[in-house]
Amino acid sequence: MAKAVYSLALDENVIRLVDAAAHRAGMSRSNYVNRVLAESVGYETAEQRIENLFSAVENLLKEHGNLHFFNASSGMATVTGSIACRYRPKMKYAVEIYPENGGYLGEVKISSRTGNGYVKNAIEEFYRLWGLMEERYVSADIPREISDGRMRRVLLRPSADLDSADLAQAIAHYIDVFDALINEYFTDLESGGFSAKDLEYAFRRAFYMRPAI
């Protein structure tokens, strides 16, 4: 929502205490005052909605041992995991929620820290297969970029009017399924046991009757 500039006459001692409180919260004076006033009149700002959304995502991901909610700030959050293969490459899921109610909910950037060429190529192949599944079963119009071991994928805004708890569930489920399937993909990679057909079946089962994001 757009913001406007207003002039207010406030007690100097109040401003001093406000500035101290804003500093402790890691916020600017304007953002802190905006939040306090919003809470006093029972209004949830866009920033608060995003914070509440990430807090719900964090609580949901606590159930999954391989995923760790790292931090959340300024509309972004980071979740880390790892792939259970010989090289144990780390995975990072950076989620950004757009503050405005546009056509897209946000985006997720998935990356891996590995210097092994074989692992990097395998991860990018998984990205490609995952993208094919999304085009087939979610939407053919999802903006996506794959390069240098990274995938950026825009999150669709669900057509249904979902509340914050439902959106948090959808985001946590997306990350959880992606992490689980890339681990399964690597577990059976050398034996050839997890084929593109297996991935398709697992993908369809995981997202059946789930809101598309």
Image (spheres, helix red, strand yellow):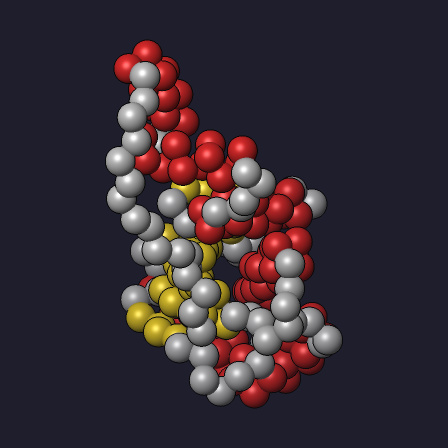
Taking the view exactly as shown, the residue that stands out farthest to the top is 13
The residue sitting at 26% across, 35% down in the picture is: 7
The residue sitting at 32% across, 35% down in the picture is: 30
Residue 42 or residue 102, whichever sits in front: 42
Mark yes or no: residue 54 visible.
no
**Residue 22 image position (x, y, % from top left):** 36, 25
Quadrant containing the N terminus is bottom left
**Residue 12 image position (x, y, % from top left):** 28, 15
Mark yes or no: residue 39 visible.
yes
Quadrant containing the C terminus is bottom right
Residue 139 or residue 204, whichever sits in front: 139
**Left or right of 57 in this view: 26:** left
Residue 34 or residue 89, whichever sits in front: 34
The residue sitting at 72% across, 76% down in the picture is: 208
> Which image quadrant for residue 110?
bottom left
The residue sitting at 43% across, 69% down in the picture is: 102
**Residue 191 image position (x, y, % from top left):** 59, 72
**Residue 188 image position (x, y, % from top left):** 60, 68
> Which image quadrant for residue 74?
top left
Q: Is residue 129 above or below residue 6?
A: below
**Left or right of 9 in this view: 53:** right
> Which image quadrant for residue 210?
bottom right
